[in-house]
């Protein structure tokens, strides 16, 4: 079964540093998403991406966040200057229809120290 | 208005029993309601989903019941098994939107 692949599985970074979280969506999917889950809390939407541009973003997705599809297979989330409260599990997802039938990756656990 | 409220927070069921998880919403623009299953260290996996034009959808041991007038929907797991022990999230999507709004999650434990 096709999978969404995320790397790294765990990243530890110093506060104020930049991090890039990487994702390889399912190859024939056109819609890409990032969500985050702070430990023990619900899954929260960050951003959706289609046709090389952001189609929707949440209040969480402020100027310190950016997304990019640098080539035909990767989808990245960059956090410019990490804060302690950015510590969370970050999930990438993709779908072949807008908002339907998401497939999530296994996540990257980001720990900001 | 964007929230989806989920209950209970945790649920313990005996093997073979029925697990019932409930969700409620306010936003009438929601038009798609999926349920996700999440095991520790893994991403959420789509279990079953429903549109508001039907009142019930069944896939194997999993059934969604949908009450449009009450703005509530629920997941029923029949013949619950220890392998069903996981966290379950309901979610909702607005018409023509792309984001999913998740409930708070229910940690289900099925005892052998």
Image (cartoon, helix red, strand yellow):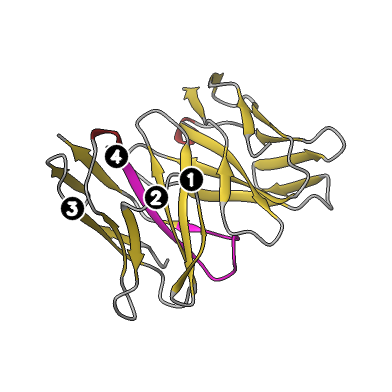
To which chain does the residue with label 3 belong?
A
Which label sits on residue A59?
Answer: 1
Image quarter (top left, top right, bottom left or bottom right) of the C terminus of chain A: top left
**Tag 3 residue:** A18
Verify CB contact (< 8 Å) between mark 3 and mark 1.
no
Tell me where residue B73 sits by quadrant. Answer: top right
Mark 2, chain letter?
A
Q: Residue A62 got which mark?
A: 2
Name the residue rendered at 15%, 48% in the picture. A17
Please identify, in this view, whether the residue under mark 1 or under mark 4 is nearer the observer: 1
- Mark 4: give few (<14), some (14-19) or many (20+) Cα within 10 Å: some
Chain on which label 1 sits = A
Q: Do the residues at pointers 1 and 2 share their chain?
A: yes
Label 2 vs 4, first from the N-terminus = 2
- Image side of residue A108 versus residue B74, left or right: left
Mark 1 packing: few (<14 Cα in 10 Å), some, or many (20+)?
Answer: few
Q: How many marks?
A: 4
- Residue at position x 29%, y 34% from top? A85
Residue at 84 percent of width and 53 percent of height:
B53
Q: Is residue A102 magenta?
A: yes
Residue at label 4?
A: A86
Label 2 to label 4: alpha-carbon separation:
12 Å
First-in-chain label (1 vs 4): 1
């Amino acid at each position: 079964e096709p999978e969404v692949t995320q790397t790294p599985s765990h990243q530890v970074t110093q506060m104020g540093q930049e991090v890039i979280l990487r994702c390889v969506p399912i190859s024939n999917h056109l819609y890409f998403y990032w969500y985050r889950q702070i430990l023990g809390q619900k899954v929260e939407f960050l951003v959706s991406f289609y046709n090389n541009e952001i189609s929707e973003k949440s209040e969480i997705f402020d100027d310190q966040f950016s997304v990019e599809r640098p080539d035909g297979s990767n989808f990245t989330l960059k956090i410019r200057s990490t804060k302690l409260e950015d510590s969370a599990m970050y999930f990438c997802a993709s779908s072949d229809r807008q908002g339907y039938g998401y497939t999530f990756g296994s996540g990257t656990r980001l720990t900001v120290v | 208005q964007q929230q989806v409220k989920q209950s209970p927070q945790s649920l313990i069921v005996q093997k073979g029993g029925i697990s019932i998880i409930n969700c409620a919403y306010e936003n009438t623009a929601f038009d798609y309601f999926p349920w996700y299953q999440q095991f520790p260290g893994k991403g959420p996996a789509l279990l079953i989903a429903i549109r508001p034009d039907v009142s019930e959808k069944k896939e194997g041991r999993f059934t969604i019941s949908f009450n449009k007038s009450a703005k509530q929907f629920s997941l029923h797991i029949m013949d619950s098994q220890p392998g069903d022990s996981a966290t379950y999230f309901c979610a909702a999507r607005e018409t023509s939107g792309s984001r999913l709004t998740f409930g708070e999650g229910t940690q289900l434990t099925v005892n052998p």
